[in-house]
């Protein structure tokens, strides 16, 4: 695989001097030294980090072992197997008792409504977690049972997750926006019998009746012979109030939304969270578990097919979440950290819950949406709490860009130091806007590449030392050894483009797919023997920077030229009228494949033949005439997963007018799909 990517800026952005002076890693030389040590002596490197945490028992001898080579036997990865610990103890008791951080704020909670907010300290969190751990025990939950959590972004979600970890149970958090069908599918896969939910939640001006969805899901479970034992329901929306009154209030930005949802109730299994908590004891000894015991299952978002229950374990995940959080966000006491991800995704697990708490950090947890009640909400929150480190997704950055700079610039934002990006390749246009407009050119941008499977960042800049290039995730994190392979599975040396794989395990990588080790092996280790295959393509430039180009199935070959759809998207989005674009391949009788581009325009722009011409000209001048899209499909929106990622496999089908869309459980807005079939270009 080899292709030029001449479209992207190769300009270097050096770390801000003040950030650099205070950073854990201040120079690239220091980074290289630490990196070298992490890959040459991983036992020593990670043992030193493990020593910062509490281990009930420590097994002497081999610190880790693994097999990536499927031809030699089963694939496995183990870190500190035989040692025992408890994640919750390390996140809470250690911070409260050993470090004396009890009164430190763990979370500033910011509700959907700007006037709805709360705080929780480490001490309060610990007390609540102990109580809830006892509630779970009372419901019969035991070590290694799997508990389903279907909650919005409220503090109870953290309490529930950590309570599971405290008693050695495995949590499976299911994003609160998922439908009954998707929820049931996940409950059934892990055979959960206890579920934690809430009566409902406001997302912007939309009311979600979570408990109703839960009950629908239970019906599906029952039809499949699976019976639930208990649901614990958080009364989040409070006492009755009419929906109309409530809507009036939110438009006036008033207090906490309250609205009686007429929560459906089955007294045999349903109980209120607050009633159970009132009765619960606040002392709960942690369950000491093996470092390789599962901590949680998390289903991947499903942009490429049937969701997989990715399993993460206790010891290695803790070390990796804590270490990546510390270095990538350069976390120091006094920082206020705000990650916008929902806890239903891996980013929410590692960088809203486990990483920050492992470091005793203070975070902002946000229930709402970036546009509610106005498109300046993120920046308003940043000013309100004086946020220093901010972490969001390119999809949010691009959407906010669309509203224009004034929604950002009217806020102060001078507290910001680091801006993170995760979830998709960030196109240079959006990167530069993030840097210049949001960050006032004062912040380090960390474009972090990772996956549900990797547990934490694997390719990322470090904010105090890495000179960044817009759109590049730069270099590997400590312990991570990337390689690029060509179609024959040969490693590409020096600059080039190929399949992004990893040669060695790091502590936070997934261990298996829940109850399906074979699927784990075939998905990640079969294509290239001896390597963990990410399924993403990447390019390494002359300076050794990695540029993730997107999933390998998003690569295409036009008249013998291999290119990634991301390149073409970067060119198209430079056009002033374009707010979002996605490019997929389409079969072509002469060229083999050709490009089919979906175009969403910004407010106030018309799609016409002039715009079409200009768009094609952009691609021609940025990449070359061969890359010019054959088809331009104007649409008002794109199909996305509930975590905001474009579902390209659906777009590929739409381009081919193929109606067999497969599993749609993760699709956020099915209407968009109907529109897209109707608006396919006429010339096809
Ligand atoms: P599924 O595996 O079920 O299809 P998914 O891959 O979207 O879902 P995640 O694990 O949340 O689920 O996302 C990981 C993927 O997101 C990566 O494989 C990559 O394609 C993309 N990604 C994440 N961060 C970045 C980044 N900084 N740059 C480029 N791509 C990224
Ligand atoms: Mg994936």
Image (spheres, rainbow, N blue to C red):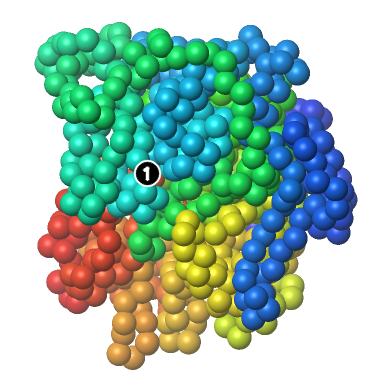
Residue 480 seen: yes
Q: Residue at x 54, y 59 (%)?
A: 512
Q: Nearer the viewer, residue 226 or 657?
A: 226
Please give left or right for residue 39 compared with residue 291 in the image. right
Residue 437 seen: no
Q: Is label 1 within 8 A of ligand 1 (CB to nearest ligand atom)? A: no
Q: In the displayed orientation, state which residue is furthest to the bottom.
A: 590
Position of 233 relative to 305 (above/below): above
Quarter of the image with the C terminus in it: bottom left
Quarter of the image with the N terminus in it: bottom right
Q: Residues within 10 Å of mark 1 (few under 14, many from 20)?
A: many
Q: Residue at x 71, y 23 (%)?
A: 94
Residue 73 drawn at (x, y percent):
65, 75
Residue 426 drawn at (x, y percent):
51, 51
Question: Image quarter for residue 367?
Answer: top left
Residue 132 drawn at (x, y percent):
46, 22
Q: Residue at x 18, y 66 (%)?
A: 680
Q: Residue at x 82, y 55 (%)?
A: 62
Please give left or right for residue 598 compared with residue 8 in the image. left
Question: Image quarter for residue 677?
Answer: bottom left
Q: Nearer the viewer, residue 415 or 393?
A: 393
Please give left or right for residue 446 compared with residue 616 in the image. right
Secondary structure at badge 1 equals loop
Residue 411 drawn at (x, y percent):
47, 20
Residue designated by label 1: 192
Q: Nearer the viewer, residue 2 or 504?
A: 504
């Amino acid at each position: 695989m080899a292709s030029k990517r001449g479209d992207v800026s190769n300009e270097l952005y050096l770390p801000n001097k003040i950030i650099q002076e205070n950073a854990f890693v201040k120079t690239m030389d220091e980074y290289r030294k630490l990196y070298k040590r992490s890959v040459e002596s991983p036992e020593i490197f990670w043992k030193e980090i493990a020593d910062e945490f509490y281990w009930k028992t420590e097994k002497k001898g081999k610190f880790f072992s693994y097999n990536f080579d499927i031809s030699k036997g089963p694939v496995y990865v183990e870190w500190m197997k035989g040692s025992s610990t408890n994640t919750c103890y390390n996140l809470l008791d250690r911070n409260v008792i050993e470090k004396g951080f009890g009164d430190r704020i763990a979370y500033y909670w910011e509700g959907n409504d700007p006037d709805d907010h709360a705080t929780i300290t480490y001490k309060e969190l610990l007390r609540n977690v102990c109580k809830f751990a006892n509630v779970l025990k009372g419901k019969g939950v035991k070590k290694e049972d799997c508990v389903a959590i279907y909650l919005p972004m409220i503090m109870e979600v953290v309490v529930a997750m950590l309570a599971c970890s405290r008693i050695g149970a495995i949590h499976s958090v299911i994003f609160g926006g998922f439908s009954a069908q998707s929820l049931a599918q996940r409950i059934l896969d892990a055979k959960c019998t206890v579920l934690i939910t809430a009566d409902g939640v406001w997302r912007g001006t939309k009311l979600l009746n979570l408990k109703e969805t839960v009950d629908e899901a239970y019906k599906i479970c029952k039809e499949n012979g699976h019976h639930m034992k208990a649901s614990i329901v958080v009364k989040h929306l409070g006492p009755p109030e009419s929906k109309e009154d409530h809507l009036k209030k939110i438009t006036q930005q008033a207090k906490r939304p309250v609205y009686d949802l007429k929560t459906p109730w089955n007294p045999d299994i349903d109980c209120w969270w607050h009633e159970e908590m009132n009765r619960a004891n606040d002392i709960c000894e942690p369950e000491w578990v093996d470092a390789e015991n599962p901590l949680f299952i998390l289903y991947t978002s499903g942009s490429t097919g049937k969701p997989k229950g990715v399993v993460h374990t206790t010891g290695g995940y803790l070390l990796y979440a804590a270490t990546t959080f510390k270095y990538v966000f350069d976390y120091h006491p006094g920082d206020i950290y705000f990650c916008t991800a929902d806890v239903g995704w891996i980013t929410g697990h590692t960088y809203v819950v486990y990483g920050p708490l492992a470091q005793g950090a203070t975070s902002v947890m946000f229930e709402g949406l970036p546009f509610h009640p106005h498109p300046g909400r993120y920046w308003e929150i940043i000013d309100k709490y004086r946020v220093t480190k901010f972490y969001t997704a390119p999809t949010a950055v691009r959407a906010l860009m669309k509203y224009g700079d004034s929604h950002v610039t009217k806020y102060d934002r001078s507290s910001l130091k680091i801006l993170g990006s995760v979830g998709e390749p960030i196109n240079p246009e959006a990167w530069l806007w993030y840097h210049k407009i949001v960050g006032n050119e004062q912040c380090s941008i960390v474009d972090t590449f990772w996956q549900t499977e990797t547990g934490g960042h694997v390719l990322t800049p470090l904010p105090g030392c890495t000179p960044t290039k817009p759109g590049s995730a730069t270099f590997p994190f400590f312990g991570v050894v990337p390689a690029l392979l060509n179609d024959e599975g040969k490693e590409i040396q020096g600059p080039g483009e190929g399949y992004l794989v990893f040669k060695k395990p790091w502590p936070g990588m997934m261990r298996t797919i829940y109850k399906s080790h074979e699927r784990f092996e075939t998905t990640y280790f079969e294509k290239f023997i001896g390597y963990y295959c990410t399924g993403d393509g990447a390019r390494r430039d002359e300076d050794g920077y990695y540029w993730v180009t997107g999933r390998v199935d998003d690569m295409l070959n036009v008249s013998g030229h291999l290119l990634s759809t991301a390149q073409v998207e970067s060119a198209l989005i430079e056009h002033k009228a374009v707010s979002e674009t996605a490019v997929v391949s389409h079969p072509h009788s002469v060229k083999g494949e050709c490009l089919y581009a979906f175009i969403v325009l910004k407010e106030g722009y018309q799609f016409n033949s002039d715009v079409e011409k200009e768009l094609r000209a952009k691609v021609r001048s940025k990449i070359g005439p061969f890359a010019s899209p054959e088809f331009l499909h104007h649409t008002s929106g794109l199909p996305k997963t509930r975590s905001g990622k474009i579902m390209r496999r659906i777009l590929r089908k739409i381009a081919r007018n193929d109606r067999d869309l497969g599993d749609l459980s993760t699709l956020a807005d099915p209407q968009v799909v109907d529109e897209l079939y109707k608006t396919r270009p006429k010339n096809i």
